[in-house]
Image (tube, grey):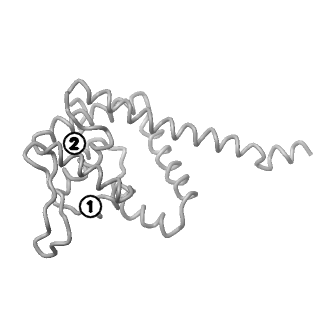
Amino acid sequence: MENKQANSGADLPAKGSALSTLVFLLIRKKVKHFNRLLEPASIDVTARQFYLLRHIFRNDGCTQREISAKLCRDKTLITRMIGTLARKDILERRADSRDRRLKRIFLTAKGRDLRDELMSIYCQHERAIVENIAPEEIEQFLKIAKQIIANCVSAEEYAELQATLFTQISSNLAEFGCEEGK
């Protein structure tokens, strides 16, 4: 009977809780690490704002809806972040030339000037977080993380993530302009 209970998954809630705690901690520590790297540079951008900016670096002139979909973030949060970055003169909203109801998001001159420095700090951050982890282990982590996500969402939502977000995920830092030795 003990054997059957041990194999029945009775200990899974504790393991699931530990996993949830570690995922939460991973996100918080990763953001905190990146913010610590940004501080000495005196760049008035947070780690969370950077991820929005990184999308705009690649897609200048995109819409708020596109940003929200690509970053898997609430439209209200994206609107607030864009507003904050616009007040800092890093981004600007412009009406679409064909549909005045649509607002496109563009980097300002200041935003374009920040790009190289922000990307350099981001690359330093990304290299630091994978230090001493074998490429095979990173690939295994990505596979497991995708499976956890699949377990948390509908098949339709997972398919959408697969088609949009997951196609951008890579363990190859060179794809982000983070060539080795830089």
Q: Name the secondary structure under disc 1.
A: helix
Q: Earlier in the sequence, mark 1 or mark 2?
A: 1
Q: In which quadrant is the C terminus drawn?
A: top left
x, y (%) of residue 170?
35, 48
Residue drawn at x 26%, y 30% as measured from the top left? 38
Report the disc number at residue 177. 2
Q: Is residue 102 left or right of residue 136?
A: left
Residue drawn at x 21%, y 35% as measured from the top left? 44
Q: Is residue 30 left or right of residue 43?
A: right
Please identify the residue farthest to the left as the structure is shown. Answer: 109
Q: Is residue 131 left or right of residue 147?
A: left
x, y (%) of residue 176?
25, 45
Disc 1, disc 2: CB below 8 Å?
no
Report the disc number at residue 64. 1
Report the disc number at residue 96. none
x, y (%) of residue 153?
54, 61
Please identify the residue farthest to the bottom as the structure is shown. Answer: 98
Distance in Å between CA atoms under marks 1 and 2: 25 Å
Query: Which residue type does callout 1 highlight?
Result: Gln
Q: Local crowd at mark 2 within 10 Å, few (<14), some, or many (≥20)?
A: some
Residue 59 picture quarter: bottom left
Residue drawn at x 14%, y 54% as measured from the top left? 92
